[in-house]
């Protein structure tokens, strides 16, 4: 092989190596981009789960407030019945 041919062959090999390196770097950038997207989707899912947990806690607090209002209404009814008993007792 002539020196010029060897030089051209070495140049082609260097070009192939450069292209392989560039493809590998591009694949790595793509993997990093995909990893970032997956991580962001997971963070968003976690934020949504936390929002749902907070909505459930708020619903539970509202149910508890309603139970407390019902207990207070029952106590008020009981006080009213007691007053009525006292009135009847005093009217006898």
Image (cartoon, rainbow, N blue to C red):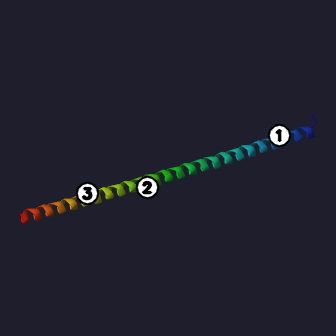
Which residue is drawn at the image coordinates 57% and 50% (left, top)? 41
Residue neighbourhood size for the residue with mark 3, other residues' Cα within 10 Å, grouped as few (<14), some (14–19), many (≥20): few
Quick check: marks 2 and 3 in contact, CB under 8 Å? Answer: no
Q: Which comes before the other along the chain, label 2 or label 3?
A: 2
19 sits to left or right of 87: right
Q: Which residue position holds label 3?
A: 71
Q: Which residue position holds label 1?
A: 13
Q: Which residue position holds label 2?
A: 55
Quick check: marks 2 and 1 in contact, CB under 8 Å? Answer: no
69 sits to left or right of 80: right
Real-space CA distance between mark 2 and mark 3, rounded to the nearest whole angstrom: 24 Å
Q: Which comes before the other along the chain, label 2 or label 1?
A: 1
Which residue is drawn at the image coordinates 14% and 64% (left, top)? 83
Q: How many numbered dots are placed on residues in this image?
A: 3
Residue neighbourhood size for the residue with mark 2, other residues' Cα within 10 Å, grouped as few (<14), some (14–19), many (≥20): few
Residue sitting farthest toward the front: 92
Quick check: marks 1 and 3 in contact, CB under 8 Å? Answer: no
Q: Secondary structure at mark 2?
A: helix
């Amino acid at each position: 092989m002539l020196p010029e041919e060897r030089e051209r062959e070495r140049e082609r090999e260097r070009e192939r190596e450069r292209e392989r390196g560039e493809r590998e770097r591009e694949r790595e950038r793509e993997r990093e981009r995909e990893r970032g997207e997956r991580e962001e989707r997971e963070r968003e899912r976690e934020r949504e789960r936390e929002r749902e947990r907070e909505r459930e806690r708020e619903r539970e607090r509202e149910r508890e407030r309603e139970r407390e209002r019902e207990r207070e209404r029952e106590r008020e009814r009981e006080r009213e019945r007691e007053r009525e008993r006292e009135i009847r007792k005093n009217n006898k």
